[in-house]
Amino acid sequence: MRRILAILMENEPGSLSRIVGLFSQRAFNIESLTVAPTDDNSLSRMTIATKGDDKVLEQIVKQVNKLIDVIKITDITDRKHIERELLLVKVGAMNDKTRTEVTRITEIFRGNIIDIGKQVYTVQLTGNAEKLNAFIDALQNETEIIETARSGCVGMARGDKALRV
Amino acid sequence: MTTELFTGAEMVVKSLSALKVKYIFGYPGGSVLDIYDAIFQQDEIEHILVRHEQAATHMADGYTRATGEVGVVLATSGPGATNCITGIATAYYDSIPMVVLAGQVASSLIGNDAFQETDIVGCTRPIVKHSFNCRSLADIPDAISKAFYLASTGRPGPVVIELPKNILTPDNKGPFSIETDIKMRSYNPNIKGHPKQIKKAAQTIASAKKLVVYSGGGIVIADAAKLLTTLVETLKAPITNTLMGLGGISGTHKQFVGMLGMHGSLEANKSMANADVILALGARFDDRVTNNVEKFCPNATIIHVDIDPTSISKTINAHIPVVGLVEIVMQQLLDELEEINFTPDEAALSQWWQQINLWRAVKSNSYEQNSGDKIKPQRVIEAMYKITKGEAYVCSDVGQHQMFAAQYYPFAKPRQWINSGGLGTMGFGLPAAMGVKLAFPDKHVICITGDGSIQMNIQELSTCSQYNLSVVIVTLNNRSLGMVRQWQDMVYGGRHSSSYMESLPDFVKIAEAYGHVGIQIDSLDELDEKLTQAFNIKDRLVFVDVMVDENEHVYPMQIRTGAIDEMWLKKGVKA
């Protein structure tokens, strides 16, 4: 089952490698991983999307928590949460028909065309992974996808619940 | 008033002094010469020069296992540091506190593939509790102090500190101060067991009909043997120890049913398999204990006490997990049992013990030794037990001799039995024994080894000469890699692929070449006398090379993929 883990950790050199190393060392799955400093520069916030049954998930959470640099980890999947991912996609836009279709699909998905080339459009879209996948599928039916870049998901619990020191 | 200024190298030594370090085990080299210079100019800490960095880590490890003090290793960058890796992993797998100071090339050269540069923090990342890259003078005392704190608290383990050359040299100096009262927002190991879990555990124990206590290395590390004995005597239940937990209760205690697991006693494994409640204390349901996890103790409610939450429900699901320091949780349990007026269910206990005594009567730890036979390895261990009155520190290498030692030398106390249980590191025994001897020069310290293992760190005989470490080395010499050969006999149709040790050296001559005493024992009738003679030599290292029966296998042995109590008692005989 797909899970989203939010991790708060010391913003130290090597912290990221400890997390990544742990996942590979214990054969845990990583679907996506994002990391950046928080408003407090001494802290990094990481979001990992992973897959596994309850037993594996329990081990992942415990093993990550065991790392000395990790302050908190929480599985946000079970409670109400917000999940967002950023997609940049460059698609072929060689004729009017394609350009119109790409623009229409982008509008339907509430994305933005943020750059154009001679025969390409670059589109930006945010949403959860499912929406991004659906968008890519829709584009694929109309034109050639030249390049995609996805940020991996970031997530946060809804309401008052917060992950902080 | 001007503040006194120190070099980074001086800060290393001053930090270690502040943390009351007595010994550093190490080997010099380019990047750490400044530290060696600083060591030379003080006399609070003694440096022990080994002959290979791996031995430095094992020696520090042995010292720690015997004393409980954090072992300190110093190695140069590159090969010096990478030679420590096996020793660091050994300590990691057995939760031994250790601080490894590794040199590094100057910061300006890092990443350039400079001479003797390796990313030792990267290399050791999966086998350390934590590691530090020092980048400035001020980092040094902070990193060392934190390293000691991390290494020795919670679930202990090794910590690596990387020290680039440029922060050690006299070019940079700074004021020195060290904070030894460490607090870290990201590290707060749980100390006390959750009261609700304690209540549940106590109630479950109180209603058990067939309780077994299963204790591991956590008891030894926590120095909690006395409390364990009190708890077990209150419960009147059988207790089994893991390989790492031997000595946690006296090996001759009447409630002790022996070691469990792959080469455990039948009564220990049967008790586990038939228990209705298992109280696991500082043990981690290792695969060498459980055998097939699918068939593991199906009727038991499992109470699992451990300081490390990751150990709980990793291999075997715990019904009542308790995270906390084992000595504190045991006291909580005792208090709770008193609170609920616990009295053992004598009728159930009597039935349970009757059953256990039937398993005991099988005498699964037994062997046949007739006069005229080649010496049986088990017989050698029993002889040593008698001669040393069961009081020696026994440091083992890895293989058949390790199992025979665990089976036939009942340990009275914790920290008396020192072996590489988790990683299974051949070559561990001799340097570990040296570390123990350094700490306890007046005690018998035995290195039980084999003709394979001893050759993995035999160069340390030289270190023994230098520091007069009068260890008694007893090699159970079967002219082969016994445990490998045993598996080849049992699983690989007797095809002895590379398990035969051709061209063994003359160990007596080797010992003598290093200035030690060498004794060879070929036959049973000279065994006791010559062994006694070896242990009577107090001020010299004695290397006893005992020719044992190469066909002897370690029994009992769990049947692969079977339940915990499915065992071979001897060749072709199932329990």
Image (cartoon, rainbow, N blue to C red):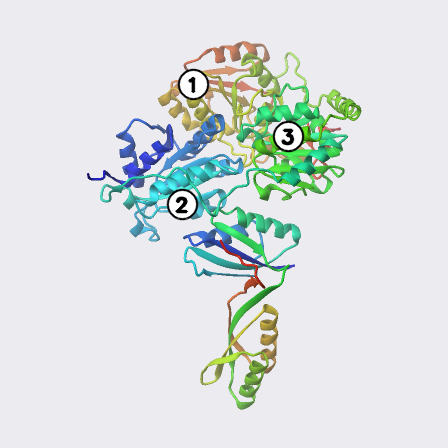
Chain for mark 1? B
Please tell me if label 1 and label 2 are on a single chain. yes
Mark 2 vs 3, N-terminal side:
2
Query: To which residue does mark 3 refer?
Result: B335
| Quadrant position of residue B23 | top left
Q: Name the residue under label 1.
A: B441
Do the residues indicated by labels 2 and 3 lie within the same chain of the protein?
Answer: yes
Expressed as whole percent of the image width and height from the top left, the position of residue B110 reads 33, 51
Please state which amino acid type lies under the numbered disc 1: Pro
- Identify the residue under disc 2: B132
Q: Which of marks 1 and 2 is nearer the N terminus?
A: 2
Quarter-wise, where is residue B510 in the image?
top left
Q: Is residue B385 left or right of residue A122?
A: right
Is residue B228 visible in this depiction of the protein? Answer: yes
Near mark 1 (Cα within 10 A), the count class, few <14, some 14-19 or many ≥20, is: some
Tell me the element at label 1.
Answer: loop
User: What residue lies at 59% left-to-right and 81% top-to-bottom?
Assistant: A108
> Circle 3 marks a residue in which chain?
B
Question: Does residue B551 appear anywhere in the picture?
Answer: no
Q: Which chain carries label 2?
A: B
> Looking at the picture, which amino acid does disc 3 mark?
Asp
Secondary structure under tag 2 reads strand
**First in residue order: circle 3 vs circle 1:** 3
On the image, the x and y values in percent for residue B399 come to 57, 30
Name the amino acid type tagged 2.
Answer: Phe
Say which of B464 and B373 sits in front: B464
* Viewer-nearest of discs 2 and 3: 3
Secondary structure type for disc 3: helix
Cα distance in 3D space between marks 3 and 1: 40 Å
Identified at 29% across, 32% down, the residue is: B39
Instruction: Quote the CA–CA distance across marks 1 and 2.
Output: 34 Å
